[in-house]
Amino acid sequence: MTAKEYLGQAYRLNEIVNSHLAEIDNLRALASSISSSNLGERVDHTRSTDPPFVRCVCKIIDMERELCANVERLIALKKEISNSINTVANADEKMLLRYRYINNYSWGKIGILMNVSNRTVHRIHSAALQNLIVPN
């Protein structure tokens, strides 16, 4: 695994967590919405007698469990990545790696924070990737 692939794991996991959060919000909105009543008389012995929001609540609970597991993995991965970044000797390289892979900042924002051009940001990034020791 290359240094870039190793560091990129946290970004992907962070996106998965954000996706789960959005889906849970949508399910909560769906569970709290009022469904229309069916005034017609129907006899159906195979139909569930649970209210419609119960399925949403069950899905929310399952998704929250999965979200917690992903958040725990993300925290552990970011800690591991942070420890790897700490092994880089150059302060600018270390700061750039933190901005990019721990804080998920864009290249433009990193350039502004470090007060350097985009070209310099990419040059520092390339050097930082060369100097980073990827754990096994």
Image: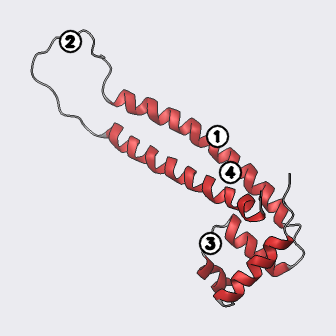
- Residue at image position (31%, 17%) is 48
* Measured Cα–Cα span from mark 1 to mark 3: 24 Å
- Please state which amino acid type lies under the numbered disc 4: Leu
Q: Are the residues tagged 3 and 2 within 8 Å (C-beta)?
A: no
- Residue at image position (56%, 51%) is 16
Mark drawn on residue 16: none
- Please state which amino acid type lies under the numbered disc 2: Asp
Give the mark nearest the N terminus, 2 or 1.
Answer: 2
Give the mark nearest the N terminus, 4 or 1.
Answer: 1
Give the mark nearest the N terminus, 1 or 3.
Answer: 1
- Please state which amino acid type lies under the numbered disc 1: Ala
Q: Establish if 93 lies above or below 34.
A: below
In the rendered image, the quadrant that contains the N terminus is bottom right
Mark drawn on residue 74: 4
Residue sitting farthest toward the top: 45
x and y, in percent, of residue 124 in the image:
76, 82
Element type at marker 3?
loop
- Quarter-of-image position of residue 41: top left
Task: Please tell me how crowded label 3 is: few (under 14), some (14-19), or many (20+) other residues with Cα within 10 Å.
Answer: some
x and y, in percent, of residue 10 in the image:
67, 57
Element type at marker 1?
helix
Residue sitting farthest toward the front: 1
Mark drawn on residue 105: 3
- Residue at image position (67%, 88%) is 119
Task: Please tell me how crowded label 1 is: few (under 14), some (14-19), or many (20+) other residues with Cα within 10 Å.
Answer: few
Q: Nearer the viewer, residue 71 or 106?
A: 106
Residue 61 located left or right of residue 14: left
- Mark 2 = which residue? 44
Element type at marker 4?
helix
* Measured Cα–Cα span from mark 4 to mark 1: 9 Å
